[in-house]
Image (cartoon, rainbow, N blue to C red):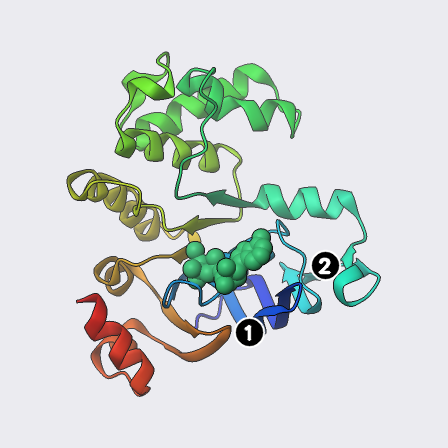
Amino acid sequence: MSDSPPVIQIRNLHKSFGQLEVLKGVDVTAHRGDVVSLIGSSGSGKSTLLRCCNLLEHSQEGEILFKDEPVRWRGEGHHRYPADPKQVLRIRTNLSMVFQQFNLWAHMTILQNVMEAPVTVLGRDRDEVEDSARKYLHKVGIGDKCDVYPAQLSGGQQQRAAIARGLCMEPEALLFDEPTSALDPELEQEVIKVIKDLAAEGRTMIIVTHDMKMAADISSHVVFLHQGLIEEEGRPEKLFGAPESNRLRGFLSATQ
Ligand code: ADP
Ligand code: MG
């Protein structure tokens, strides 16, 4: 992996929902500029791992470090929670999540959607945020859609707006949860292109994806999860070109 400083480190992460143990001791690190792809069957724990990274879910055991700063916890096990709301806010705003279902506000224009969190959550200057929102919307190719509402856009355009919204937080890293799986194949490509451009400019990203071609193209590191454990991980050439585990081989041939 790269020599650049770590942005996110996950160590020995355990997460259960009630009796169901979903993550059973997982380690993942993303250094600055890394693109880490998480692959695996449905139910293997990919989304849960991503949501634990930015503290949308609370893990029961293990450490999460943001730029070498450990998350501080109080309590134990199912009663373990992040101790410091300011730290949670700082980490969450620095790890912007892009969801499968876009999650845009229907009653706000695209520009308002992108500006909302930087203005209200981070308290940044409205004019300055508007400039950067327009810049990011232009960057993802929908600079002409500032004043329309989400329902007036295609799925691919909505997802690109959601990516612009993530970028406008000026995060240290972007977390993507199956960003293209709600889209028709022809719209998938326009979102993949945006993600590829972000990878090429050195953005730190963790991407849950079922798109093995994209993962092979842009990842610096690929993690194959199986039933809450890392079954195999490594560089994409190795993972896709010469997989060692039978489970990974089976998974890859099923996704061809
Ligand atoms: P993946 O993203 O790899 O498909 P998930 O992380 O979404 O997997 O889910 C892993 C397991 O955790 C599944 O069995 C799922 O049903 C369960 N799970 C996920 N979220 C919750 C939740 N909020 N409450 C209970 N079980 C959940
Ligand atoms: Mg998922």
Q: Which mark is residue 217?
A: none
Is residue 106 visible to us here? yes
Q: Residue furthest top?
A: 147
Q: Whereabouts is ligand 2, in terms of quadrant?
A: bottom left
Which corner quadrant of the image does residue 34 belong to? Answer: bottom left
Q: Is residue 86 left or right of residue 34?
A: right
Q: Earlier in the sequence, mark 2 or mark 1?
A: 1
Ligand 1 contact, mark 1 (Cβ < 8 Å):
no
Q: Nearer the viewer, residue 234 or 248?
A: 248
Residue at disc 1, secondary structure: strand
At label 2, the amino acid type is Val
Question: Marks 2 and 1, how far apart in space?
Answer: 15 Å
Q: Residue at x 25, y 81 (%)?
A: 249
Q: Which mark is residue 71?
A: 2
The quarter of the picture where the N terminus appears is bottom left
The 10 Å Cα crowd at callout 2, few under 14, some 14 to 19, many 20 or more, is some
Q: Position of residue 207 (x, y in %)?
A: 40, 56
At label 1, the amino acid type is Asp
Is residue 33 visible to us here? no
Which corner quadrant of the image does residue 219 belong to? Answer: bottom left
Which corner quadrant of the image does residue 121 belong to? Answer: top right
Q: Position of residue 234 (x, y in %)?
A: 37, 77
Residue at disc 2, secondary structure: loop
Q: Which residue is mark 1?
A: 27
Q: Residue at x 38, y 69 (%)?
A: 221
The 10 Å Cα crowd at callout 1, few under 14, some 14 to 19, many 20 or more, is some
Q: Position of residue 44 (x, y in %)?
A: 44, 68
Q: Nearer the viewer, residue 20 or 231?
A: 20
Is residue 160 placed above or below 148 in the rendered structure?
below
Q: Residue furthest front?
A: 19
Q: Residue at x 60, y 22 (%)?
A: 119
